[in-house]
Amino acid sequence: MDIIHSVADLRARLQREPNNVFVPTMGNLHEGHIQLIDVAKPRAACTVVSIFVNRLQFGPREDFDRYPRTFEADCKRLREAGVDVVFVPEEKEIYPEPQTFVVEPSDLQHILEGAHRPGHFRGVATVVLKLFNLVMPHSAIFGKKDYQQYIVLRDMVRQLALPIEIIPAETVRGPDGLALSSRNLYLSTEERREAPRLYRTLRHAHDEIMTGARDFQRIELHSMSELANHGWKPDYVAVRRQADLQAPAPGNRDIVVLAAARLGRTRLIDNVEVFLK
Ligand code: PAF
């Protein structure tokens, strides 16, 4: 496994590697990331992973400074997973000058996560386009846990005609249902015990819709009070259609229920897809 720090070395290394698949990450790798790599590996001769905590996608009061950085452990995991190239740039390698040109996503950037994290998807889309230009993969893998991120990036690639296939990977969960996330590390023991309620609440909404409930607003409000009654501060629980994250119209069959809520100081997100027959 080659560990590369500079853009020049990355370009030189990948010049002989036209067949590569890319998994961008912010490090602090867990089983969820290994799942992305498992999806990636059979698709190309060379699997490239980046580790870069991208300041541009964090708000001024978010956790950029305390975001866990665990480089040695990450490299061990990546080696075991059979990754070929790891790109770990310093901030000045990616942003040698202030990033004044940015990718401005559609109105999708202002709803759900975007409404609570202004500028977040602009920061994500800008760094991902930049990383795509450095790695030049034919495919890239994104986890469905960050569902809106996946949709924004899928649309970016389509609308800007990038020759890259965006492949979604399923969310990996602990035995109690909690979606794996780097931010789970922030939870106290007590909060960790409470955290699976987010997924249980989404599953409950899923089951209600599957068995015929169509008053989505009632489901959203009920789910939010279930969380609030157990000490959470929900930002949203939203029933949307998978295609564009807008409110479902009668007849839409592919639905997703998305949620974001704070447990103590930690903000968790999760979602469950609903496929109506
Ligand atoms: O999902 C993430 O870890 C980040 O948003 C990404 C895609 C690596 C961009 O910084």
Image (cartoon, helix red, strand yellow):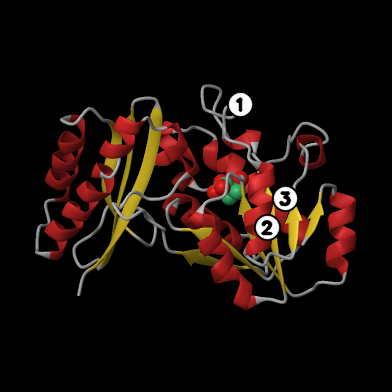
Give how far apart the Cα atoms at labels 3 and 2 are: 14 Å
Report whether the residue tagged 3 is closer than 8 Å to ligand 1: no
Mark 2 secondary-structure assignment: strand
Q: Is 54 on the left-hand or right-hand side of 250?
A: right
Report the residue marked by disc 1.
Answer: 65
> What residue is at 74 percent from the left and 35 percent from the top?
99
Q: Is 158 on the left-hand or right-hand side of 6?
A: left
Q: Quadrant of the N terminus?
A: bottom right
Q: Residues within 10 Å of mark 1 (few under 14, many from 20)?
A: few
Residue 105: in sight, yes or no?
Answer: no
Give the mark nearer the N terminus: 1 vs 2: 2
Expressed as whole percent of the image width and height from the top left, the position of residue 14 reads 83, 65
Is 8 drawn above or below residue 252 in the view shown?
above
The answer to whether marks 1 and 2 mark residues whose Cβ atoms lie closer than 8 Å is no
Give the mark nearer the N terminus: 3 vs 1: 1
Q: Amino acid at mark 1?
A: Asp
Q: Residues within 10 Å of mark 2 (few under 14, many from 20)?
A: many
Expressed as whole percent of the image width and height from the top left, the position of residue 23 reads 62, 59
Expressed as whole percent of the image width and height from the top left, the position of residue 155 reads 53, 59
Residue 144: in sight, yes or no?
Answer: yes
Is 6 drawn above or below residue 140 in the view shown?
above
Q: Is 231 on the left-hand or right-hand side of 159?
A: left
Report the residue marked by disc 3.
Answer: 130
Residue furthest toward the left?
Answer: 212
Q: Amino acid at mark 2?
A: Val
Report the residue marked by disc 2.
Answer: 49
